[in-house]
Amino acid sequence: AILQQLLGSGYEVRNYGVSARTMLKKGDYPYWKEQKYKDALAWNPDIVIIKMGTNDAKPGNWKHKDEFVNNYVEFVRSFSALPSKPKIYVCYPIPTFPNNFLPVDDSLIVNEVLPRVKEVARKTNATLIDLHTLLLGKADYVYDTVHPNVKGTTVMARVIAKAIAPKRNFPKPAGDQVDVVFIGNSITEATYLKQTPPAIAAKDLDSLGYD
């Protein structure tokens, strides 16, 4: 909702996030098996934002870490092959904070997950978005040590919006509406909308750090 608000009417943003899902096909809940994955492909979007890796890093899943890059590359290419030839962005996952319920220490995210996501971006020519750095040390930007609250999602949306449309005014693009799909495992209707309002007031956007 915040990304839609920032980009404006020239874009249509849809959230295909599913809580607890993994990029790893051998993970406990692979996103590959979800109907939303099929729906996202069927929508034939113009822009695809992918933010995965947090649940992959859970101890029971990360034992398959050697397959993470290959699975992720295959996932990205499943969208690259669409008739719309979408622009694809892959995102570093946000930090985890101490005593989280997964449990995943943020040092594992930094030392093992982020380098692999960077490798995926390189192998697929996807654009890399850093959603990790700006939330470091900001435990008040998540509501349960893992999932972002309205402050966290606002920062994330602003960083993504700036990557999509670098000019701050986000002018309406020429021609048809641009379809944007978000695929992730920490911003979902099941989690975020239960904790915070679906959008943040426009007057509050500038206080949360666009850059």
Image (cartoon, helix red, strand yellow):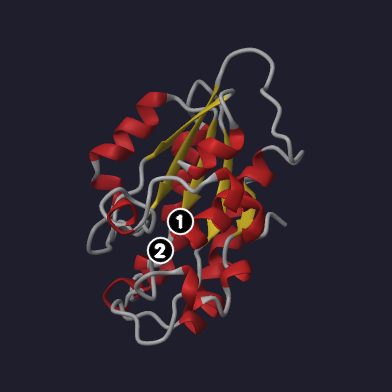
The residue positioned 70% from the left and 37% from the top of the image is 165
Q: Nearer the viewer, residue 111 or 173?
A: 173
Task: Please provide percent x and percent y for residue 122.
Answer: 65, 54
Q: Nearer the viewer, residue 139 or 54?
A: 139
The residue positioned 58% from the left and 53% from the top of the image is 204
Q: Quadrant of the C terminus?
A: bottom right
| Mark 1 touches mark 2? (CB < 8 Å) | yes
Q: Please give left or right for residue 209 compared with residue 102 in the image.
A: right
Disc 1 from disc 2: Cα separation: 5 Å
Kindly identify the amino acid type of the residue bearing the numbered disc 2: Glu
User: Taking 134 as reference, is 169 above or below it?
Assistant: above
Mark 1 packing: few (<14 Cα in 10 Å), some, or many (20+)?
some
Mark 2 packing: few (<14 Cα in 10 Å), some, or many (20+)?
some
Judging from the image, what secondary structure is the residue with disc 2 in?
Answer: helix
Task: Please provide percent x and percent y for residue 176.
Answer: 58, 14
Task: Please provide percent x and percent y for residue 139.
Answer: 48, 77
Q: Quadrant of the N terminus?
A: top left
Whether residue 123 appears in this view of the structure is no
Residue that mark 1 sits on: 70
